[in-house]
Image: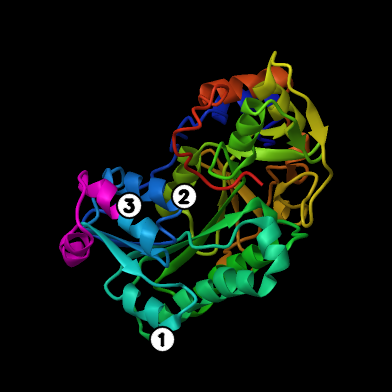
Amino acid sequence: MKLIHSWQSLFNTVSFGQKYECKEVCVYSLQGKKVLVTGGTGSMGKILVRRLLSGELGLPETVVVLSRDEAKQYDMRASYANKIVGMDEAVYENFKKRLQFWIGDVRDYRTVCNVLRGVDVVINAAAMKQVPTCEYFPYEAVMTNCLGAFNIVQAINELSLPVECVVGISTDKAAKPVNVMGMTKAIQERIFTSANILNKTTRFVCVRYGNVLASRGSVIPLFHKQINAGGPVTVTVPDMTRFLLSLEQAVDTVFAALKFAEPGETIIPRAPAATVINIAKALVGNRNVPIEITGIRPGEKMHEIMISEEEINHTVERNGYYVIKSMLPELNEAPVKTKVLDKEFSSGDWILNPEETITLLRKNNLLDLDLSKEIEGELLR
């Protein structure tokens, strides 16, 4: 069965953050467990932590946020305390709380060993993910995106830690990568996938998704600032396309992986895409603001790929998501017999028209962005 024959059906089904219905039995609970979120003070981590603490999958006994940014940790801790507290009080009370904070870096093996003790579930959101930064500092991207993942796997194995599940957060740039960020994320996927071969007690899985709407530092708030300043609005290449998800959809994908991903699998959300020029025109609207074309930047693709031509041979559909099964034969009981995709899942093939782009932005309250409010989410690159 071919899943999506028309863009309109996909647009109507999943473009606005609607939760996917679980058509199969998905029983997984975090009730009473200890969950570690690396990179938990980042935009993705913040929303993930909020959703974890809501008890949506059962209320964890403890949620531990590991990051190297002391200031972000303090701000996040104070916001959850819902009051202004002194620095000393916040730190001294840290390990008495359901939400705990740990200063450290996934690059440091000793830190990873220490923070993993007693943990049941790991969600690895720590990453270097800005494409230009990774291009100019590739070794730093390797250290965080690759070594950080390896440190998690090695610590679990060497210390025989009873971790139930590790979810690695990847990106569409890992499919047929052309930039350092995508290359390092592709290796991270392989590090977690192969970990299932030697460790039969921990379930290592991944999620892969595209760009999150209106995140801090992304193109949408940039366009709004340029519009408010009278322009010009700078567009790299008009026909460049990107997959677009709400941040809630991104977290939904992580929860889907926790609920039903099997060892070595990568969960892919079905997401719409839009051209950069349509986004710019939708935001400019009837204003007399010029649009300027600046050209493609180092490491950028014209179109992103969520599932490559090679991967469609290992892809199935489950509970409204695409699932890429591991290419390692030890992790697959049988080959995929029926393809659910005729071709690679590319942003260039699933493009919203101008009216649909406007509708998507309106649904996410982005046509009249209040620049005084903090924008959460990952970068729209």
Which span of residues is magenta-colored?
Answer: 76-97
Residue that label 2 marks: 44
Residue 76 circle label: 3
In this view of the protein, which residue sits in the foreground, 49 or 20?
A: 49
Asked if residue 21 lies left or right of residue 127, the reply is left
Indicate which label's residue lies in the foreground, 2 or 1: 2
Q: Magenta span has 82?
A: yes
How would you classify the magenta stretch by its main secondary structure?
Answer: helix
Residue 368 circle label: none
Q: Position of residue 28 (x, y in %)?
A: 33, 51
Which image quadrant is residue 8 in?
Answer: top right
Q: Amino acid under label 3? A: Met
Residue 192 vertical position relative to residue 375 in the rendered view, above or below: below
Q: Earlier in the sequence, mark 2 or mark 1?
A: 2
What is the crowding at mark 2: few (fewer than 14 residues within 10 Å), some, or many (at least 20)?
Answer: many
The reply to whether the C-beta atoms of the residues labelled 2 and 1 are less than 8 Å apart is: no
Q: Earlier in the sequence, mark 2 or mark 3?
A: 2
